[in-house]
Image: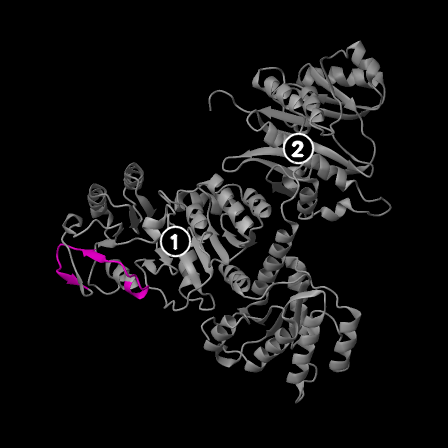
Amino acid sequence: SSHRLAPLLQPRSIAVVGASARVGSPGNEVLVNLRKGGYSGPVYPVNPGRDQICGLDCYPALAALPEIPQQVVFAVNDTRLEACFDDAIALGVEAATVFSSLSQPGLAERLRQKAQAAGIVLHGGNSMGFFNMAGQVWVSGFDTRDHTRPGNVVLLSQSGAGMSGILDSEERLDILFAASTGQELCLGIEDYLDYVLDLPATRVVGLFLETSRQPARLLSALEKARQRRIPVVALKVGKTELAARLAISHSGALAGSDAVFDAVFERYGVQRVDDMAQLAAALILFAQPHPLPAGGLATLHDSGGERQLAIDLAAELGVDYPQLGAASVVRLEELLDAGLPAVNPLDAWGSGGADAGRSMEACFTALMADPGIALGAVVHDRAPGGGIYSSYLQYLRGAHAATGKPVCLVANCAGSGSDPQVIAATRAGLPVLDGLREFQVAARSVLAYRDFLARGEEPAPVPTAPEIIVRWRDFLAGAGDLDESVAGRLLRDFGIPVAETAVFDGPAVPAGIMRSLRFPVVLKTAQPGIAHKTDVGGVVLNLADPAALRQGCAEMAARLGPRLAVAPMITAEGVEMLLGVARDSQFGPTVVMGLGGVYAEQLRDSVVLLPPFSAAQAMRALSRLKMRKLLDAVRGREALAVGAFCEMASRLSLLAVELEDVVAEVDINPVRLMVAGCVGLDALVVRAQTDGR
């Protein structure tokens, strides 16, 4: 292969510095893993104290080898590592793997610089290695289970435990490639993602992410996954402030704002999960072989209480249980015991008589035959000893044979993925999963990814006229005043509705401005350096006539300074929203939309998107707001003009890209969202720093 990672992941020959005969030591485990993985190239143990290790000739130093190895694996401690690394550079090796945590001050940075200068492809440090099952190259100093079947699931983790927690014990997954990327001195998780997307067998990729050190490369890899229709499931840690702070010390990683990762995942159809069990469940479900038709989820239960649990979890997780068609209801009513409702999810156990099994299978087949159902599960409790009831697998076989749709067996509580019957059924395309929550998250993921692919490439919004972009870029590159009236003009030129504001030096209102006003009006401070006017009492509403305005101006000028602004009072009722542009240190400009007004920061009900985006994309993102229902028709008020707000957000997303290098931040808060439309009532635009930074 010509991929730049080939010398590391498919090396012609490997030397192991620090090879050892001591069972269980990393220097021994590396040799055991290379043999277990079926590596066919020459392996050269390096240890001055031995003649042979594991039946292989042992060499005193790298310089004594009969050929230059393409890769060197370092299983030595920090005190000896750097000198050995220098030997490898002197030989001209192409790739290296380092397991050590490189905790000595300055060591990690020196190794990074040396590897980059020598053009060495370096894996690690602080890594548990990688397993290229497809290429039969297992480079790890840690024991794992026997992986006897060629797989189609990829697992990439910045945490060692994030890899081994699934790789070592989840026998329902046949792994194609797994890597623990560690400190990522030279190679990041993004590089491995790019590599595995070129492997023809890759069906799904799981990521355990702490951050992204190469954001642009992450985005291009995710775009490649989208084009190749390969689903990516991500467990991203560092959601909380404390977890994000710890990430700085853990992997030398600054966790980007978590909401921005949500924006990235949304843009590229990445399915996010919350823990390791959900990650494993989603990978199992994505790896199953049967295509997913249109429709939602159906589950069959042998317990009424368990059915209630399924309904409660679905409501919390946003999982869709479609209502059944009339024909399905008629068919189920023929099969069910009296008193059991023919609904989805379905409790079909009834009195559990002698023919309960036959009835359960017939009911499940009837459920799966409904045209509104795409994916089905039989939910059960594990048998004593953690096994499964084989009769339940028969329900799956019957329904799948009749409909061709994907079906699975789900334990209502965690079981074991190493039960032979469980592994066999999963490999046969009838996945067996554990835990209702885990299963529903996995089901939500496969259904959402199907819908993401069906939407295809969405039309980008129509660009702003070039002369407008050029005029404002020139203005922003200069030093002209950027007060609220100028900010408003800028936004209006980009098609973003913002109320016209007149700014002047008070306390007297210039006659021309006074003549142009239609009362009532709002008076605001325009004093430079006051970003949040409400906090300092810098907004006075509903001034009804010139006398009230003059009095307000005199009072505000005396208290906050002479620079003042006056704007029309928007009296139509509505909801206060917020729109803004913020620059993320990793991913560049982002657009924030959500609930606004004085309590915006306390409510924290907002979503972040990567610009540019269409009004349709904005509409979908808006549905993630906790207070979304406020915007619908409520108590004698018609639904608000959400479409107009989404169009406004889309126009702002264009500005964010078109003026990316001259605008650092935009804050339009509040945006009054009304029945008849929407308008920004207060606008702040912050220039990008142009002092060479």
Residue drawn 68% across and 47% down?
620
Mark linked to residue 463: none
The region drawn magenta spans: 35-53
Which element is circle 2 on?
Answer: helix
Give x and y (percent) for residue 145. Answer: 37, 67
Q: Earlier in the sequence, mark 1 or mark 2?
A: 1
Q: Is residue 529 above or below residue 92?
A: above
Q: Is residue 152 above or below residue 652?
A: below
Between 21 and 328, the residue placed more toward the observer is 328
Mark linked to residue 180: 1
Between 233 and 469, the residue placed more toward the observer is 469
Three-letter code for the amino acid on which mark 1 is drawn: Ser
Are there few (<14), some (14-19), or many (20+) residues within 10 Å of tag 2? many
Q: Which residue is mark 2?
A: 652
Between 103 and 231, the residue placed more toward the observer is 231
Residue drawn 84% across and 48% down?
635
Give x and y (percent) for residue 525. Answer: 69, 21
The answer to whether residue 131 shows anywhere in this view is yes
Instruction: Tell me where residue 582 sits by quadrant.
Output: top right
Are there few (<14), some (14-19), or many (20+) residues within 10 Å of tag 1? many
The answer to whether residue 533 shows anywhere in this view is no
Give x and y (percent) for residue 300. Answer: 66, 73
Q: Is residue 158 above or below residue 31?
A: above
Q: Is residue 546 located in the magenta-colored stretch of the structure? A: no
